[in-house]
Amino acid sequence: MPQPVSLLLDCDTGIDDALALAYLCSQPHVELVAVSSTPGNVDAEQVARNNLALLELCGRPDVPVAIGARAPLEIPLVTTPETHGPQGIGYAELPEPQGRVYAGDAVELWIEAARARPGELTALLTAPLTNFALALRAEPRLPELLRGVVIMGGSYYYQGNTTPTAEWNTHVDPHAAAEVFAAFSGLPEEKLPVVCALESTERIEMRPEHVEDLAREAGCAVPELVLPGQPEGLRSTASNPLVRHLSDMLRFYFEFHRAYDQGYIAHVHDYFAAAVAAGTVRYGTRTATVHVETAAPRLLGTTVADYRGLWGEAPNARIVSENHPGEAFDELIRSLGALARRIHG
Ligand code: BDR
Ligand code: CA
């Protein structure tokens, strides 16, 4: 059993965010302290609706879901319906949530939680860094108050997924990302954010057989087949609602990746970041000084890592340099399958 982990999750749910959230709900050693909703893949209200519905589906209606910023710090919000569907969850139609969004502000919620439990909470960020940048403005001691930080964002010496050089989360709010990395400059190595960037998260390539394995693990009697030859938009008939909704999300994500010539697969970036934060997968990191471009129009959101100290600036990140996709999928299927079987089997 891994060490207990208490998480503040900030996400823009999002198909891979949804997988990450469901996975975290399946981990008995993970305490979800709060889930905040950042505009990104869809607007903040829709992110919050998705988070509430997913937490209820995963048997965790008790977790507060909050909203902070409604837009990036300095530029207009651009959402991505072609990647995650109009509601951010592909073809899934989640039940209307029973619960309500937390009445206060997400940024205040984070700060109160971090102050109340100094050194205990880990921040997991799978969205543009808008809310986290605002939290750091309001409480500059946040890096010391938090036990750790895990970020999904950026791409280092690896092509972008939004522009030729920029990754989605850093491209949506480059100013926030720049502020966040600046806030960690020169802190002790164990306080530097662990950064899961495209060169490591695109190795976490989900395939149809993983969906089939998940359904089997969840106890579904009929094989869950999401296949490239099937008509686009086909809906799952799985008996298990968690499997059914995840399957409908992942079919959309497979189709999106195929439309961009990447094959009938899905990069589940945020699941990997969640597993890193939960301490359930092996990975290695390299310390670096990260720069996020906020001025050059063609390079907006592009991230550069100085691994060799050539800029003469203190490090501000630990970038994942090694991961193990096979182990990560074994872990996902075992844990999420068990949750689906336990709650809906
Ligand atoms: C990131 O962008 C979003 O669309 C995904 O949810 C993930 O967080 C990958 O670039
Ligand atoms: Ca995300």
Image (tube, rainbow, N blue to C red):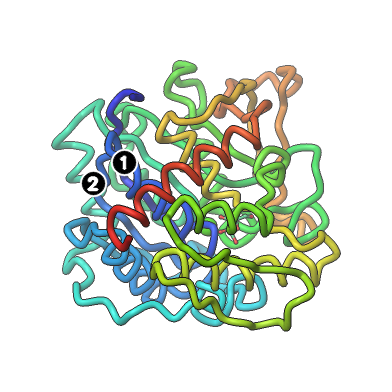
How many circles with numbers are drawn on the protein?
A: 2
Q: In terms of image quadrants, where is residue 4?
A: top left
Q: In terms of image quadrants, where is residue 197?
A: top right
Eyeballing the image, is 16 above or below 306? below
Eyeballing the image, is 110 above or below 185? below
Query: Could you tell me the amino acid type at mark 1?
Result: Leu
Eyeballing the image, is 106 above or below 110? below
Query: Could you tell me the amino acid type at mark 2?
Result: Val
Callout 2: 10 Å neighbours few (<14), some, many (20+)?
A: some
Q: Please tell me whether mark 1 sits on a helix, a strand or a loop.
A: strand
Tell me which residue sits at (62%, 30%) in the image: 320
* Residue 103 horizontal/vertical position (percent): 16, 69
* Residue 335 horizontal/vertical position (percent): 42, 43
Report which residue position mark 1 lands on. Answer: 7
Q: Is residue 333 left or right of residue 309?
A: left
Is disc 2's CB within 8 Å of ligand 2? no
Q: Please tell me whether mark 2 sits on a helix, a strand or a loop.
A: strand
Callout 1: 10 Å neighbours few (<14), some, many (20+)?
A: many
Report which residue position mark 2 lands on. Answer: 33
Q: Do the CB atoms of the residues marked 1 and 2 lie less than 8 Å apart?
A: yes
Q: Quadrant of the C terminus?
A: bottom left
Cα–Cα gap, marks 1 and 2: 6 Å
